[in-house]
Amino acid sequence: MSFSPSWMWSWSDLVSHMASETYELDLREDCRVAVYSAMAGPCEIHMAGVDKSEADKLASLALAETRRIEQKYSRYRDDNIVSAINNAHGQPVEVDAETAGLLQFADQCFQISDGKFDITSGVLRRAWKFDGREARPDRNFIDSLLATVGWDRVKWTGESLALQPGMEIDLGGLGKEYAVDRVAQMLTGASSASIMVNFGGDIRVLSSTRESRLWTIGIESPDRENEALGHIELRDGGVATSGDSQRYCLYRNRRLGHILNPLTGWPVAGAPRSITVIGRNCLEAGFLATLAMLQGKEARQFLDLQGVEYHCSG
C-alpha cells in the first residue's frame, strides 16, 4: 500500500494564499517552532538548525499548504470537491489528480480492512454524540443510516466518483494525516533542515543530511493530558494515535470511543483506550491505528501481524 501524489502548488499561488494567515514563531532550545491552529486543533512545525528568516519562510509555506488542504477537503464547506461529490445527486463527478490519489488510497483501505475503513460512513455521526455523557442510540435511525453506507456501492473509475443518492463521503479519517505528510514533504523540498510536523499528535519527521536528528516524541496518557506514558525516538517516519481520551460516550456503564464500525453503525467495544502506531509516513500510521481500533479486543494481535512498532494503553 503506497500513496505519493506528485501534486505541487506554484510559489506564486502559495504567496497569494498566505497573505491573510498568521502563526507564532518560538525558539525552543535549538529549534524554531511555528504554531498555528487548523483542522480543529493545534499545529506545530519544528525546524532544527535554521535561523529566523528561514524559519519564517518555511512556516509560511506550511501554513498555506495546511489551509489549502483544509479548505479543499473539509466536509463543513459548500464550495469544495467534497461538497460537489456529496451534492451531485448520483451523477459522476470528475476529480483532479490529488483527489484521485486520496480516493484511491481510501479504496485500498476499504479493501484491506474488509470494509471496516469506509469513507462513506461519516453519516453515522448523526446518530451519536461523543461528549462524555450517556448515549441514547436509536437503533432504527442507525439502521436507516447504514442503508447509505458502503464504499462498494459507489462507482469509482479512478477519475470520477458517483455516489448513490443519499450517500456522502467524509475524508476526515485521512485528511489531517495527509496534510501532515504533504507539509513535511514540501518543507524538506524547500530546505535542508530537519523537520517535525505535529498536528494534534499526528506526526511526520524527516531528518536532513545537514543534521541527522533523532526526534523524541512523547506518548500521551489517555487519562492525563500532557502526561507522557513513554517516548519514541525517530529519525524518519510517521506517528499517529487513535483513542477515546477526548471523544467518547457512556452506554450501559461502558465507555465507548468515537470510532464507529461502518458494518454495524455502533462504536467499537473492547479496544484499547489508546493506540499509537509508527509507520513509514503519517497517513499509513493513521490508517493502521484506526483499523487496529476497529478490531476491538483483537487490536494488539492485528498490529503484531502487521509487523509495525506500536504502543497500546488500556
Image (cartoon, rainbow, N blue to C red):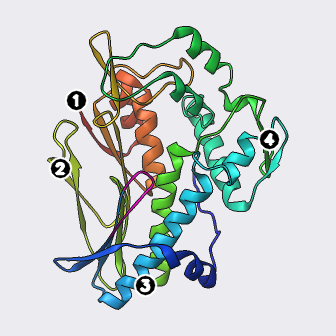
Query: How packed is label 1: few (under 14 Cα within 10 Å), some, or many (20 or more)?
Result: few
Give the residue pinned by disc 1: 314
State which quadrant residue 117 falls in. Answer: top right
Viewer-side label of 3, 4: 4
Mark on residue 57? 3
Find the distance from the CA under tag 3 to the CA under tag 4: 39 Å
Query: How packed is label 4: few (under 14 Cα within 10 Å), some, or many (20 or more)?
Result: some
Find the distance from the CA under tag 3 to the CA under tag 1: 42 Å
Disc 2 residue type (three-letter): Asn
Taking the spot 52% from the left edge, 76% from the top edge, the residue there is 18
Query: How packed is label 2: few (under 14 Cα within 10 Å), some, or many (20 or more)?
Result: few
Mark before the other along the chain sequence, 3 or 2: 3
Residue 313 is inside the magenta segment: no
Disc 3 residue type (three-letter): Lys
Find the distance from the CA under tag 4 to the CA under tag 1: 43 Å
- Residue 124 placed where, x, y %? 55, 26
Residue stretch in magenta: 35-41
Q: Which residue lies furthest to the front in this view?
A: 20
- In contact (CB < 8 Å): disc 4 and disc 1: no
Taking the spot 46% from the left edge, 23% from the top edge, the residue there is 128
